[in-house]
Amino acid sequence: MLHIVNKSPLTSSTLESCLNTATGGDILLIEDGVYAVTRGNAVESKLRAAMGKFRVHVLVPDLEARGLGDRLVEGVLPVDYAGFVELAASNKTCQSWL
Amino acid sequence: MSEVKKFMFVNRKAPYGTIYALESLEVVLITAAFDQDVSLMFLDDGVYQLKKGQQTKGIETKNFSPAYRALEDYDVEKLYVDKESMDARGLTEEDFLVDVTVLSRAEMGALMDEQDVVLSF
C-alpha cells in the first residue's frame, strides 16, 4: 500500500508513526515531509534504515520549493505530480499520516 | 510617536507547508514601518525559511524568500538563528540567503527575555 507523509520529521511524529506501523510497500513524502529525505538532517539514519524495507519516494516540486533539490538522500525515488497519481492508482489502498 | 519598543518575531515553522512563515513576514514589515526595534529569531523548522535556492514554480505558490533580503531596507537587521536547529537540519550559515547571527539556545532564551513584545509564529 501507499503511505503519504506531509509533516516535517523534526516537528511532528507522523513519519515515525508511519515507519513504526507500516509493514512495507511505498512511502511518498510531500509538502513539509520532504525535509526527511534531505542529507544531513537528524532523521537521515532512520530514513536510510527504512529504505531497506520500503520504496521511499519524494515529490520533487515540494523539494525544489524549499531550496533542497540538490540535497536528496541517494536511493530515494523522485516523482513529479504524474508519478504521485501513478503511485496512488497502482496501490490498492493509501494512508495519509496527517 | 511614543517610545520605541523591542519587538521580537519568533519563527518556528517551515515555509509553504503552513501559512505562518509568510504571515510573520507580513507583520514584520508592518512593525518596521512604525520605526520599532525589530528582531527576528529563527529556530526549529523556522530555520528552513532562510534556505537559499527556493524554487516554487512547481507548487504554484509565491516564492517569498527574496523578501528576507529586502528586510535591511526597512532597517530590520537583527536576524538570529539557533545553532542547534541549524545543525539538526544539516544546514550551515552558507545555506542562508541573508547574513544572520548564530546563537545557542541559551542565548536565544536570554534575548527573548529582553523584549517588550514577543510575537510567535
Image (tube, rainbow, N blue to C red):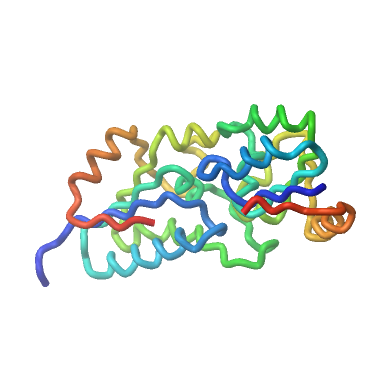
Residue A12 in percent (x, y) is at 53, 45
Residue at coordinates 57% horizontally, 67% vertically from top-left?
A: B62
Specify the farthest residue to the bottom. B1
- Tell me where residue B113 appears, x and y as whole percent: 20, 44
Relative to B105, say whether B43 is above or below: below
Q: Quadrant of the C terminus of chain A?
A: bottom right
Q: Residue furthest left?
A: B2
Q: Nearer the viewer, residue A9 or B81?
A: A9
* Residue at (83% x, 60% y) in the render: A85
Left or right: where does residue B17 sit relative to residue B29? right
Residue B56 position by quadrant: bottom right
Q: How many marks?
A: 0
At a point 63% along the width and 48% down the height, the residue shown is: A33
Residue B81: quarter of image: top left
Q: Taking A69 as reference, is A48 above or below it?
A: above
Query: In this rendering, would B39 be left or right of B92?
Result: left
The quadrant where residue B9 appears: bottom left
Residue B27 in the image, given as x and y percentages of width and height: 35, 66
x then y, percent, for residue A38: 64, 39
| Relative to B79, B48 lies left or right | right
- Give left or right: position of B78 versus B115: right
The residue lying at 78 percent from left, 36 percent from top is A23
